[in-house]
Amino acid sequence: MRAGTLQDLLKAGDRVAVSNITGREAGDVTVASQKYCANVVGGWALGKGGQAIDVPGAPAIPVFAGAGELFAKLPPPKRPNKVVVYSPPLAVYGEVKEIVDHAKGGVETMFIVTEHVSIEVTAKIARLCADANIDVLGGNSLGMINVLDGVRVGAVGGDSPAESFRAGCVAILSNSGNMVNTMASYLQSAGMGISYGISTGKDVLILLPVGDLLELAASDERTKMLVLYVEPGGLYEKRAVEMLTRTKFSKPLIVYVTGQILATRDLSLGHAGAVVEGGQTSAQAKMALFDEYFGLPPFDPETRYRKSPKLTKGLRRGLRITTLHHLPAAAKLIGDMLGIERDFPPAEPLHLNPWFADYRDLARRLPSRVILPAGAIPEPYASYARVATGERLGATPVRRNMRNASHASSNDGRITRIHGYSLEDQMAQGSFVRSVLLAWTGEPVTQTEEELLARCFIAAISNGPGTISAQGVKLSTSAGNEPNTAIIAALACIGDVHGGNGRQAVDYLLKVFRDIDIADPYDRKHGIDLDDLVHRVVDRFAQERDAAKDAGRDYDRIPCLGHPIFKDDAVNFDPRERVVSRFLEERGLYNIFLDFYHRLTLRLKEVGIARNVWAVNIDGAIASVVLAMCWRALREKRITIQRVRSIAFLAFALGRAAGAGGEFLDHQDFGSPMDMRVAVADCEVLTRPKD
């Protein structure tokens, strides 16, 4: 090997070139790397010489016709000393040979990303590069990241390496490139950062195997602990353990061996090297190999480990974990026992985040601790899921060009219709609220729902001149604007914090009730143990809040609880919400979602999360009314979740727009131009004069 430490493989100041740089994968990865660390000096692609790849916020990357042209035209200070090979399998040997012929000793390391390079070609590459004193990582490697120096090659870390990789003292060596990212994320919850993340690749012949990398790690002062992700196939780990034993390796390892299921199932891990070549290369054999080296049984999170000479001696070598989510706890154990300091305060623990959840009848029989609600889907997958599911409990909306088409309205020259219903008939019935809800939902509502929403509209008209939206319309009016502009100013002051909480409450209620079969949200005899549900919800909230506080991070609040004005009594009420609740009570009616909210406030006080009983604010009442009104349509796949969320927001916005009109008229009659301006004497200066 040419390298003496892991840092020699990739460090700050290294200059990287990329073969086949205009290919789809190579181009995307290279642009992301250039944004992250700007270490790519050029690349080449057949027939693309003279072009350049633009990178937002980073230097453009010149493209040459071949490796020879790149080395000839770049001045010596800019010539690459690291090369990433993205060429097709049949072209890899030719690319490597051309690099060796033209590099003239300047290239130190090659990273071969290409998968399925033949064993014969890989062996030739090994000999060719050894003679040229070039280290080769791969094939089928995702690359490497040096977190301490803030540089990478290849796709390790994806489009946003800084999200998964924080600097620290743990090196990750993995057959799987994607698992480097996953394990780095897990370690954040133990307060352990990463020094290096290396994807060794897992073609049949690995050119820089784990044993060689461990030797480099032994002399790397910045690495205190290593994590190994091991797949079946190959004798590399056996040879590595022999080296560890022979050299009395001084840094602890955490090892995860995957692929045990291959012993009993006809499955493939998808890597060419995951071919079992005999008894010593199976997953079970590799597990036994590491357990014997460590002299300890695999890590058990239920065991209370007490410091002893035997445990300390074993942990100096390391520990095997049986499941990947035990990694943070195992790292913490080794760190605590051996005095390896954490790199930063522990982050919020990773937890299972099912994108979809449908337990059906099992929900009543399974322990509550294993019933997980559907969580948040990260982008870009959330966008794909919205397209696939229509953001609803069932059906998918049909997409089409809507430039000159509408479901909500029509006019054939004789009759104007709203969702197919005659506008003139709606006028004859004389209910503005009923017609608005028809326009929003596409279906007639009941008399009770109409009366409930009417109260919600009225509640949103005003909460005094000091509210943000009222201030918006008054500011616009004092500036001399017309009514429409002033009302737009009020609506522009409505957001998730002011007015949009109803939208968040719909999301929250759907999350809570997603796996519960509610046939009729108005039926008091629903058969659901709401108290048990509330207890489970509050317990989960308390755990998430405590974990976030321990990690020094913020946590998700429960929407629509509490109010800046109605907050100081032992039991608090938003008087507007009380009007909605009394309307239901006086008519013997029921809303399961509003009932849940009221029980939730009591339970939060009982467990000490709240010092008094919080008010359910008007946004929570609006969300409960809207969700109940739309529930049957949601179940029957006639309406999207996105529409229900928007209706909850629109209910507040419509009432507030009407109230904004009142504020406009009042300020127009009695105010004076620019009277909303803050006097200079009342403005506080926070910066010193710079002139």
Image (cartoon, rainbow, N blue to C red):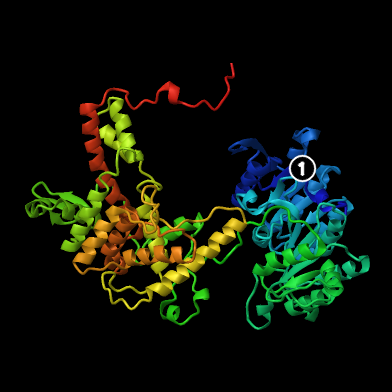
Whether residue 530 is situated above or below residue 476 in the rendered picture: below
Count the marks: how many?
1
Depth check, front residue: 40 or 289: 289
Q: Classify residue 89 by image quadrant.
A: bottom right
Q: Residue 192, position in %: x, y?
A: 71, 57
Q: Which residue is mark 1?
A: 12
**Farthest residue toward the left?**
428
Mark 1 Cα-neighbour bin, 10 Å: few <14, some 14–19, many ≥20 = some
Residue at left offset 37%, top offset 47%: 565
- The type of residue carrying mark 1 is Ala
Depth check, front residue: 318 or 255: 318
Depth check, front residue: 421 or 478: 478
User: Would residue 205 be seen by someone viewing this image from the given angle?
Assistant: no
Position of the C terminus, as image quadrant, is top right
Instruction: State left or right for residue 425 relative to residue 62.
Output: left
Instruction: State left or right for residue 239 relative to residue 577.
Output: right
**Farthest residue toward the right?**
246
Q: Residue 10, position in %: x, y?
A: 78, 48
**Farthest residue toward the top?**
691
SS category of the residue bearing label 1: loop
Whether residue 678 is situated above or below residue 207 in the rendered picture: above
Position of the N terminus, as image quadrant, is bottom right
User: Would residue 665 be seen by someone viewing this image from the given angle?
Assistant: yes
